Image (cartoon, rainbow, N blue to C red):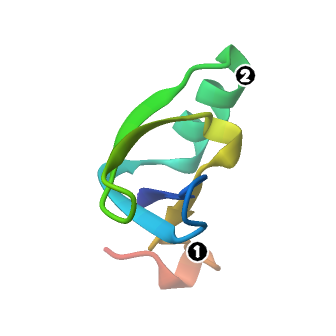
Amino acid sequence: MGLVSYRCPTSGENVSTAIETRSDVLVKMREKALSLWVWCPHCMAGHQIKPAEALLQDEFRVTSPGMAAS
């Protein structure tokens, strides 16, 4: 799981949202061309963000089966 982040189209600043999802869900949103409406604290406006413009922060990745939590 990771937090969705994007770059503000007005200020160019990175914005972290409170939306948490998995990378496979973000891929499905990209395939369906769905958009997210988010509030930007940098320019104080709402933005319609395409999933192709979004990234996931803090995504937990297991690098080997031995590292998985029991």
- On-image quarter of the C terminus: bottom left
Query: In the rendered image of this protein, does residue 39 appear above or below residue 60?
Result: above
Foreground pick, 32 / 42? 42
Mark 1 — residue?
65
Tell me how far mark 1 sits from mark 2, CA to CA. 29 Å
In terms of secondary structure, where does tag 1 sit? helix
Query: In the rendered image of this protein, does residue 38 appear above or below residue 17?
Result: above
Badge 1: residue crowd in 10 Å (few <14, some 14–19, many ≥20): few
Callout 1 amino acid = Pro
Callout 2 amino acid = Glu
Question: Measuring 54% from the left and 83% from the top, which residue is drawn there?
Answer: 66
Mark 2 — residue?
31
Taking the image as shown, residue 27 lies to the left or right of residue 8, namely right
Taking the image as shown, residue 20 lies to the left or right of residue 29, namely left
Residue 53 in sight from this viewpoint? yes
Q: Which residue lies furthest to the top in this view?
A: 32
In terms of secondary structure, where does tag 2 sit? helix
Foreground pick, 18 / 64? 18
Question: Measuring 73% from the left and 22% from the top, which residue is drawn there?
Answer: 31
Q: In the image, residue 43 lies at what x, y percent? A: 39, 58
Taking the image as shown, residue 67 lies to the left or right of residue 27, namely left
